[in-house]
Amino acid sequence: MDQLHDPRDPKKITYPARFLVWTGLVLFLCKLQARRQLGFAFQTPTALANLNTLAATLLAQVEHSDTLAYFLTRLPLTELPQLLVWLVQRLLRMKVLDRFRLDGHVLSYSHHAVEAKLVTALGFTCSLATEFLENVDPTATKQDCEQKAFHRLAATVKRAFPQLRICLLLDSLFACEPVIRRCRELDWRYVITFKEGSMPERWQEFQALKRLTPAHRRTLTTADGRTQAFAWVHGLPVGAEVANVLECVETAPDGSVTTFVWLTNAPLDATTAPRVANKGGRLRWKIENQGFNEQKCGGYALEHLYSEEWHTAKNFYVLLQIAHLLAQLIEYGSFLRHALGGTARAVVGGVRRLALYLWESLRTTPLPADAVCPQAAARIQIRLDSS
């Protein structure tokens, strides 16, 4: 955190940037849901001592919540996203997420906030970068939109993770030639939801090509009794680009039928088609529920207005993403199961209760010195528990 650029006058600083960032993270880690709660939740000597330990400071009291907002109002919008990038890069170097890759590619999806999130089948998600929809040019003839923001977001992610092999999981809004071209230029894979209404002519052509390739079929039964019938075609024209199309018709034990169709540049055959569908395309729906819905309804109060200043609200939003990443490392990490004998739900009654226990611990239990020792931290191996 010492690498963050602090724009404030050094002669007038009482609370260093690292202390303010830590209090902001604690606001979300403990799910206090409003910044004014900092003034009530951490007014104990032990809480102050723990915050000083985390931030390597010697402050006499916790700042007023307006001080945190003042700092975030002046902090450049490039600083906290870079901190998030450093954290994700650290996880990638430690190979924490390697077993969740699809054919060597990490999975990423975009939401209506136009945010790139790295996702896993376990439920663990973390933000890579965010683009906010804004209309700042009064002379512009067109509104900002998700597709425009996608291209800005793609450039940001590529700069931050130039060597990372990425497979984008996108909804039908992005089923278009410019997005497919951009993925080709960046050497990224994609699995995009394909609906008849998004490209009617291409949909009809897919149906015709499917009838002409009866050998491109496979049917299998899952462990829970669902039947999946796969069909695929190669080289569907999308403007000047081409894409493969994968269809999965799933029949549940009760007889209900659901059809999924995706555009993809992943190679498709009888072996790869089920993997691309079940570990790629189908994963987006599960993760969307466990990602953004967790931040909205799981105690993080994503939709709460932490500041009326748009610049400040953006920085609070990134702090929330960093805190959610740290909380998931606790929730999904193997330490909790090994040390306490079970998952967060089994041991403390769920992730909301886990935040409450963290809050009480910070208020009443001093952190040991080795908890913030850089040498000890370098020896830590983070492992996600999928049991």
Image (cartoon, grey):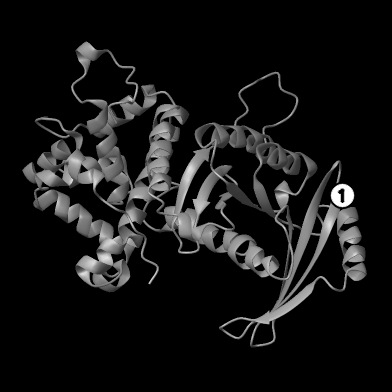
* Residue 229 in the image, given as x and y percentages of width and height: 74, 77
Q: Please determine whether, in this image, residue 226 is positioned above or below residue 93.
A: below
Q: Please determine whether, in this image, residue 185 is positioned above or below residue 28.
A: above
Q: Residues within 10 Å of mark 1 (few under 14, many from 20)?
A: some
Q: Nearer the viewer, residue 163 or 237?
A: 163
Q: Nearer the viewer, residue 39 or 204?
A: 204
Q: Nearer the viewer, residue 297 or 210?
A: 210
Q: Secondary structure at mark 1?
A: strand
Asked whether, in this view, residue 372 is left or right of residue 327, the answer is: left
**The N terminus - image quarter:** top left
Task: Check the image and name the residue furthest to the bottom.
Answer: 254
* Residue 247 in the image, given as x and y percentages of width and height: 76, 67
Quadrant in which residue 76 is drawn: top left
Residue under the point 20% across and 31% down: 63
Residue 181 can be seen, yes or no: yes
Task: Check the image and name the residue furthest to the left.
Answer: 45
Say what amino acid the circle numbered 1 marks.
Pro
Residue at numbered disc 1: 237
Quadrant in which residue 85 is drawn: top left
* Residue 153 in the image, given as x and y percentages of width and height: 59, 36
Residue 304 can be seen, yes or no: no
Residue under the point 31% across and 70% down: 345
Asked whether, in this view, residue 316 is left or right of residue 286, the answer is: left
* Residue 313 in the image, given as x and y percentages of width and height: 43, 34
Residue under the point 27% across and 57% down: 355
